[in-house]
Image (cartoon, helix red, strand yellow):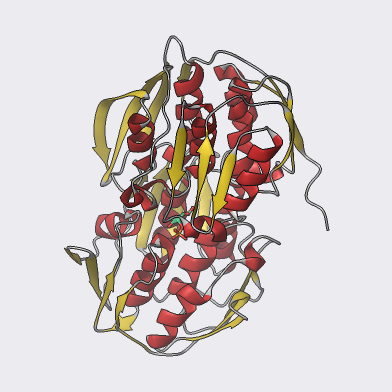
Amino acid sequence: MSGSSARYLVQPAGRVGGELTVPGDKSISHRALMLGGIAAGRTEVHGFLPSEDCHATLAALRAMGVTVEQHSATQLTVHGAGVHGLAAPGQVLDMGNSGTAMRLFMGLLAGQAFDTVLVGDRSLMQRPMERVAKPLRAMGAAIETAQGRPPVRIAGGRPLAAIDYALPMPSAQVKSAILLAGLAAEGVTRVTEPAPTRDHTERMLAGFGVRLARDGASVSIAGGQRLTATRVDVPADISSAAFFLVAGALAAHDGLVLRNVGVNPTRTGIIDILRLMGADIRIENLRESGGEPSADLIVRAGPLRGVRIPEALVPLAIDEFPALFIAAAAAGGATELSGAGELRVKETDRLAVMAEGLATLGVRHELRADGIRIEGGPVSGGTIDSHGDHRIAMAFAIASLRATGPLEILDVANVATSFPGFVPLARSAGLAIS
Ligand code: S3P
């Protein structure tokens, strides 16, 4: 089976600029729906990301009896069913391309009274689910995977007991799944991370009135707590802004402004790494709403240099490496990444698929088991296969700011999973994309 026939044609361009607002944060949008769905009362969500991934979560909640009123693409009201209020869906739940939806729902559904089956698209059906199933089983859940992959079958009606679990890999999805299962478990569940990962679940649970205790690398939650509906203001997604941060660092000669971007410190590795490379990024109008900080980001073009990326920043920029590899290709000198084996189990094997595209554009690099070394230098045009990976498609569109010839990027339909309206927004910034 081949991927979708949708493709981008991108002509070389030398300049970007203006003021942009990228769509809402994907991680926060999923969580607003899920927590709103099990809260008591009406949760108002503003700035929701109307993407395919978030719509998969929305459809699953509706299938389990949650009423969601959609006032506009980005504003909705979730009528919470309460912690014990979800109903058997009567159908397989399709998570589409979304690992976040599947893994967080595993945690949420492990303690329900009814059975569920979770499936996804071709990419998601290949992704590892035992990392979540294993700790949930240790809590008493009955979960089956198919040799570690979806379909995920959850048998309901099993009482859950708290665990004290040390995550073997830095993963906010696994952490979140265990915390959500912990809500339904008897006792105090504790999760310890090997390195900090995005903490939106913890922040949002607190916003819904749930008590959590943080102690260094550990977070604990007592079972049996109720959630109280609240208002969630979703900031713009820094993972979507990342493409324009790189574009701006390469070609915003008069500056490029990105409005109201989420700058939770567990997500800002992209800013730290680009600054290490010499990028001029300013953070202005820092504010906070609903426990999540946001700010305007102003980026200006200047020379970039290759760096060795500190391993501690890897989980804090985990979704931004496709964009960062384009910055590395345009930088002076070599950029080295290690400790990033998790990139091999994203929507695609992002190390391998990015390496393939860089090779097509004549960018010298050395692929490693858990990273890559990229030599900055000339970037040619060519035909890139994104293998249906939204972030890889968008990253190579940004490469047009350095490319000496046109780029054709194949299999781009999945950009709609995270960034509806990417093409018109990129055009408004100055990219010659169609
Ligand atoms: C996410 C966590 C990360 C990230 C994904 C979104 C989340 O995945 O890559 O895009 O919303 O919790 P891992 O937990 O697998 O690192």
Count numbered badges in the picture.
Answer: 0
Residue 31 vs 377, above or below: the answer is: below
> In the image, residue 231 lies at what x, y percent?
33, 47
Could you tell me if residue 424 is visible in this image?
yes
Residue 55 vs 299, above or below: the answer is: below
| Picture quadrant where residue 220 is located | bottom left
Q: Of 209 and 374, which appears nearest the observer?
A: 374
Residue 300 vs 348, above or below: the answer is: above
Q: Of 91 and 105, which appears nearest the observer?
A: 105
Quadrant assignment for the C terminus: top right
> In the image, residue 320 lies at what x, y percent?
47, 42
Could you tell me if residue 111 is visible in this image?
no
| Picture quadrant where residue 90 is located | bottom right
Q: Which residue corresponds to the image point at 45% horizontal and 38% vertical from the top-left?
A: 335
- Figure quadrant, ligand 1: bottom left
Residue 152 vs 420, above or below: the answer is: below
Q: Of 10 and 186, which appears nearest the observer?
A: 10
Q: Which residue corresponds to the image point at 62% horizontal and 57% vertical from the top-left?
A: 97
Residue that sits furthest to the top in the current view: 254
> In the image, residue 59 lies at what x, y percent?
59, 59
Q: Of 218 and 63, which appears nearest the observer?
A: 218
Q: Which residue corresponds to the image point at 26% horizontal and 54% vertical from the top-left?
A: 207
> In the image, residue 159 lies at what x, y percent?
39, 90
Left or right of 94 in this view: 295: left
Quadrant assignment for the N terminus: bottom right
